[in-house]
Image (cartoon, rainbow, N blue to C red):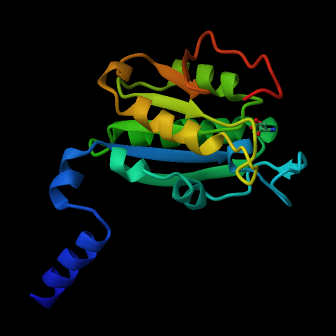
Amino acid sequence: MRKILLTLLLSASLGVSFADNANKPTVEILATGGTIAGTASSQTSTIYKAGSLTAEQLIASVNGLSDLANIQYAQVYNKDSGDITLNDWLHLASEVQKAADNPKINAIVITHGTDTMEETAYFLDLVIKTNKPIILVGAMRPATSMSSDGPLNLYNAVAVAIDKQSSSRGVLVAMNEKIFDSRNVTKTNTTEA
Ligand code: ASP
């Protein structure tokens, strides 16, 4: 009885209701690194290290994410996307397929560096078998930047992931308030967010 009461009190103080949890979709965030998880020594520095924040830190930095969905996450790897190897790709594909095959997961969001995001999006589009939404997202400025674009991009990616219209569309990229098809997306700008 004490345990039940404590659980109820805790969930009330966290603003989580059991009914809400059951009604909300569940999104698995698979973190792979990139600028979205990058950190610099100051808010204005243009020199930073991609793939520094953990999945947990990245998710914690986005206000309101848990209002949209039940969030689960896994750190697949944490690197600059220019350093991704074939083995990393195969490992990511198997984690994505595992999440897609899990009946408790409704959609998948992958945080990724933008340098090779288009290659990963197209690769996953070819090899993953699912109707569930799969959304890749990144950022042009590191997480520590004064004008970091990562948190809003990640919030929007989860919003796209839980939208019914995102099902059966293959892999999508959601960035800068736009949604791109994995077959046609190309990085054309290395500075603008
Ligand atoms: N070098 C970074 C990466 O691809 C660039 C970015 O994420 O925008 O990991």
Numbered marks: total:
0
Q: Residue at x 36, y 28 (%)?
A: 132
Q: Residue at x 68, y 58 (%)?
A: 53
| Front one among 147 and 187 | 147
Q: Residue at x 55, y 60 (%)?
A: 56
Confirm whether residue 124 shows in the render. no
Q: Quadrant of residue 36?
A: top right
**Image x and y of residue 46, in percent:** 89, 45
Classify the position of the C terminus by image quarter: top right
| Front one among 171 and 3 | 3
**Image x and y of residue 152, in percent:** 56, 40
**Image x and y of residue 99, in percent:** 41, 42
Furthest residue to the top?
Answer: 184
**Image x and y of residue 131, in percent:** 35, 23
Q: Quadrant of ligand 1?
A: top right
Q: Quadrant of residue 168?
A: top left
Confirm whether residue 95 shows in the render. yes
| Front one among 72 and 142 | 142
From the viewer's perspective, tell me whether residue 74 is left or right of residue 186: left
From the viewer's perspective, tell me whether residue 49 is left or right of residue 30: right
From the viewer's perspective, tell me whether residue 79 is left or right of residue 5: right
Q: Residue at x 52, y 22 (%)?
A: 172
From the viewer's perspective, tell me whether residue 140 is left or right of residue 92: right
Furthest residue to the bottom?
Answer: 2
Residue 94, compared with residue 1, is above or below; it is above
Classify the position of the N terminus by image quarter: bottom left
